[in-house]
Amino acid sequence: MRQSWWKILTIALLLYTLTAGLLMDVPRLPILNETIRALHFHVTMWFGMILMLVVSVFYSIKYLRTNDIKNDDMAIEFAGSAILFGVLGIVTGMLWAKFTWGDYWSGDPKQNAAAIGILMYFAYLILRNSLTDSQQRARIGAIYNIFAFAAFIPLIFVLPRLTDSLHPGNGGNPGFNAYDLDSKLRMVFYPAIIGWTLLGSWIATVRVRMRRVERVLEDRMINS
Amino acid sequence: MLKEISVLVKKELTLEWRQKYALNGILLYVVSAVFITYLSVGARSGSLSIPTWNALYWIIILFSAVNAVAKSFVQEHQGRQLYYYMIASPESIILSKIIYNTGLTLILALLGYGVFSVILGNPVQDQGLFLLNLILGAIGFSASLTMVSGIASKAGNNSTLMAILSFPVIIPILLMAIRISKNALDGLDWSVSADKIITLIAINAIVAAAGYILFPYLWRS
């Protein structure tokens, strides 16, 4: 956990994302225009969120197998970072939608699905806080986390594809692949995904360490 | 295993039959909810538009199902649960509860359908598809709600928690069911709804499988 190379990589990738994402030439397209830059700041949030939710579920499964509270720390903090990214994704998406679709909320299936997904994970946080015993909290939290993820996958990957969406790439709108023939955007997009995900993991690991320090201090206080 | 499940389902039925007030209560709940809706929208029979009919119907079924299933782990107190823990495997307990709750939800849905037809009119054009959809919806509702009620019962079992935990999880099922139901109301050809039916079955399978795998961990704690 002490390794620092990936933190330096995070900073480098995010600096690159910010400068190249904001300054580099982008394809000029009707309606989208300059807002296509949201690709690096909005779309990447969802990629980061889903990757971190996968990590969170992985640690929840690991917790159920081992009953080691350390796995639960990872699960809750990665879920926490994912929720942060999800909220940022919704906010950036709403700003983008105001300029391209004309409204903050247009009832787009992907928007709705994302909002429901966030509700699911808020419920997860409330469930955890309603339990007082730490082992029980970890166990029941892990169970709900896995269960919610199982419902989250069809919600986010299947349902929006069954109806027309206003999002680029859906319902007759050309996808980014069609816009992006010289793959200029991709040169920023892929590093941006990695950069944002690493930033989320960094936040999560710092918070995990805080949790562990607090636990040790608490134990010491009780034992002394 | 099959024998164990059938015995457990029988046990649930007997238990329900002995405490008739719970069953009657939830049935009355459905009827009152439909009647309140009828009075609130102020619609004369048949004048409700089809999307509104559909939405109101499913919302009432959703709330009744949440209330009906919420009690599946509260009814019996700790001591008796410990007894089941010793004599039955957790897998057969969750399956028996899911089967029993499917039946209960289906009864609620049919009753709601009956009352809706009488006082708000019956615009359904394809009865077969509508009933098939009700069965699939009932399976999905009971699979997700049974698991969530198990979780909520471990967390002091307050009804707010039951609601906030179950609503987001149930929305994918609810959305698919509403869409298929809309097609049935409009009397569209089955081929239009085929992919949605398959998706609904798949979501049901995912939720039920997740419950089946996770319940033993919940039961043990």
Image (spheres, coloured by chain):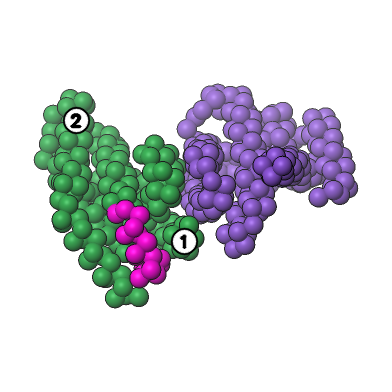
Chain colours: A purple, B green
Main secondary structure found in the magenta portion: helix
Three-letter amino acid code of the residue under disc 1: Arg
Where does residue B10 sit, x and y in percent of width and height? 22, 66
Q: Is residue A87 left or right of residue B159?
A: right
Q: Which residues are magenta?
A: B76-94
Residue contact at pointers 2 and 1, CB within 8 angstroms? no
Where does residue B116 sit, x and y in percent of width and height? 17, 40
**Magenta stretch containing residue A171, yes or no?**
no
The part of the image, by quadrant, that contains residue B161 is top left
The part of the image, by quadrant, that contains residue A62 is bottom right
Q: Secondary structure at mark 1?
A: helix
Q: Secondary structure at mark 2?
A: helix
Res. B220 mark: 1
User: Do callouts 2 and 1 point to residues on the same chain?
Assistant: yes
Quadrant where the N terminus of chain B sits is bottom left
Q: Is residue A183 left or right of residue B20?
A: right
Dot 2, crowdedness within 10 Å: few (<14), some or many (≥20)?
few
Q: Residue at x 31, y 59 (%)?
A: B80
Q: Is residue A164 left or right of residue A13?
A: left
Task: Report if residue A79 is visible in the image.
Answer: yes
Task: Report if residue B58 is visible in the image.
Answer: no
Res. B36 mark: 2
State how far apart marks 2 and 1 are (Cα): 42 Å
Chain of the residue that carries numbered disc 2 in the rendered image: B
Where does residue A202 sit, x and y in percent of width and height? 76, 42
Q: Residue at x 24, y 60 (%)?
A: B12
Which residue is more in the foreground, A162 or B205? Answer: B205
